[in-house]
Amino acid sequence: MTADDWSAQISGGEELAWNGGEWPLGAFAAAALIAGEVFKVSMRRLRDHAKNAPLFEDLYAPARSACVRLAPAETPHATSLDAIDLISGGAIGNSFLYTLLRLPRCSAEIRVMDDDESALSNLNRNALLRRSRIDIPKVEDLASFAVDRIAIKPLVHRYGGEEDPDLADTVIVGVDHIPSRWSAQRSRPTWLGVGATEGFSVQVSHHRPGQACAQCLHPEDAPIDGPIPTVAFVSFWAGLLLAADLIRKTAGTLPSDNEQQVFLPALRPESWDYAHSPINPRAGCPNCAELGVVS
Ligand SMILES: [Zn+2]
């Protein structure tokens, strides 16, 4: 594997020289790529138990080579971030904060909202969680990672229900609860980043005024029934992609509307070249109708 500031590459054949430096985003992507390959090596030992052998072979086959580019090479390292509201103390929120806390000279004021306490089942994927911190409110644990230039203010609150606080202009949502994404969008932030995972796939989008909103992209509530299957590197991708988008927004170099969302099946990173797409404003979206984006 190799990485530079904004991109990562793995190859099963050729030897790659490491190009990483002080800026860690590309290296994080390289780590997530390799974690996926290690996971697949483990899964292939279960091949004899597969119910659908052809699908199993396709899904868990090694990636011969893959290249993920989080931003163009010349993208500035913009690290003076705005005030941010982070709605998620879970795996995606952990990954997002893990990333920001490791950026050189990053400064930010972050308020993190969640009403949950860390549990044993969170240890596999919450990048900042330690065994000794189980049963503590997630936001309080995350706030303990604050450093000089990165303030993290905890708010024990389940966003998307009653008596939600006013939100900052920059909002990151990483919760599975889809109506929370709608509520955050209706607060009219000037920039909303939404990170979502399902199965082994990651979907990250950003929404500015005039663009298709989070409710256009996630129009149906899908109540969660039973335990949520999780694997660490999938959640990590979501937080990493959100952080990269936020830095691009701060640097004033966000991609065009044609790249408003990224959908990455994390086990098949070869698909990165086709992972970005536009989001069409959805006729009948109540939020966009109110704003006149659609009728
Ligand atoms: Zn909409």
Image (spheres, grey):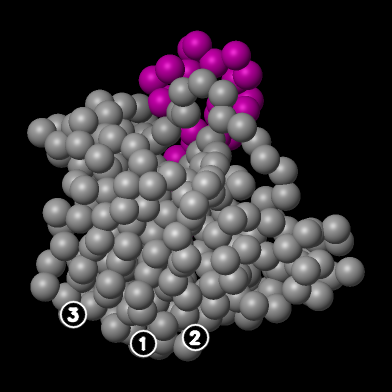
> Residue at 58% across / 34% down in the picture?
58
Residue 58 colored in magenta in the image: yes
Q: Position of residue 226 (x, y in %)?
A: 51, 21
Give amino acid for label 2: Thr
The answer to whether 217 is drawn above or below residue 123 in the figure is below
Nearest to the observer: residue 15 or residue 169: 169
Instruction: Specify the label residue 253 is tagged with.
Output: 2
Q: Which residue is mark 1?
A: 76
Q: Earlier in the sequence, mark 2 or mark 1?
A: 1
Q: Position of residue 261 (x, y in %)?
A: 61, 63
Instruction: Specify the label residue 238 is tagged with.
Output: none
Residue 94 colored in magenta in the image: no
Q: Which residue is mark 3?
A: 105
The answer to whether 174 is drawn above or below residue 138 in the figure is below
Q: Position of residue 203 (x, y in %)?
A: 56, 53
Tell me the CA gap for discs 3 and 1: 13 Å
The local secondary structure at tag 3 comes to: loop
Contact (CB < 8 A) between labels 2 and 1?
A: yes
